[in-house]
Image: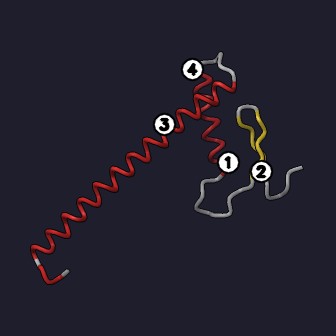
Amino acid sequence: MISSKEAEFDVLGLRIKSTPEADEGKISTKEIVDLVNREALKIREKSPGLDNGKIAILLALELAQSKLSIERDLKESVLVLHERGTKILELLEEVNPSSL
């Protein structure tokens, strides 16, 4: 039996029980499950002969690649912003040395 705080989802034919996150800023379990199911369907359409286990592995690899790519892009963006911020501070110090 599922408590009122739990939700049940279907992922690749498996029933998954999950307790919703209390934080409003968090991504909901439903959103995550919907993404997984959409991406699994894309893989299934490209390769209809694959079983759910292989689809799950391919999906995990695709999502991991995406996550790592996003993390790398974020890290590079933070470094660029830091460098630009440092240059701006240096320019401001040149223009008005007493303001900083």
Verify CB contact (< 8 Å) between mark 4 and mark 2. Answer: no
Vertical order, 74 against 55 (above or below): below
Judging from the image, what secondary structure is the residue with disc 2 in?
A: strand
Residue 65 badge: 3
Q: Which residue does the image show at 75% across and 32% down from the upper left?
A: 13
The residue type indicated by label 2 comes to Ala
Disc 1 residue crowd, few under 14, some 14–19, many 20+, Cα 10 Å: some
Disc 2 residue crowd, few under 14, some 14–19, many 20+, Cα 10 Å: some
Which residue has dot 4 on it? 46
The residue type indicated by label 3 comes to Gln
Q: Which residue does the image show at 16% across and 69% down from the upper left?
A: 90
Q: Which residue does the image show at 71% across and 32% down from the upper left?
A: 12
Residue 35 % position (x, y):
60, 40
Verify CB contact (< 8 Å) between mark 2 and mark 1. Answer: yes
Residue 99 % position (x, y):
17, 82
Judging from the image, what secondary structure is the residue with disc 1 in?
A: helix
The residue type indicated by label 1 comes to Lys
23 or 76: which is nearer to us?
76
Lower sequence index among marks 3 and 1? 1
In the rendered view of the protein, which quadrant contains the C terminus? bottom left
Distance in Å between CA atoms under marks 2 and 1: 9 Å
Which residue has dot 2 on it? 7
Distance in Å between CA atoms under marks 4 and 3: 19 Å
Distance in Å between CA atoms under marks 3 and 1: 22 Å
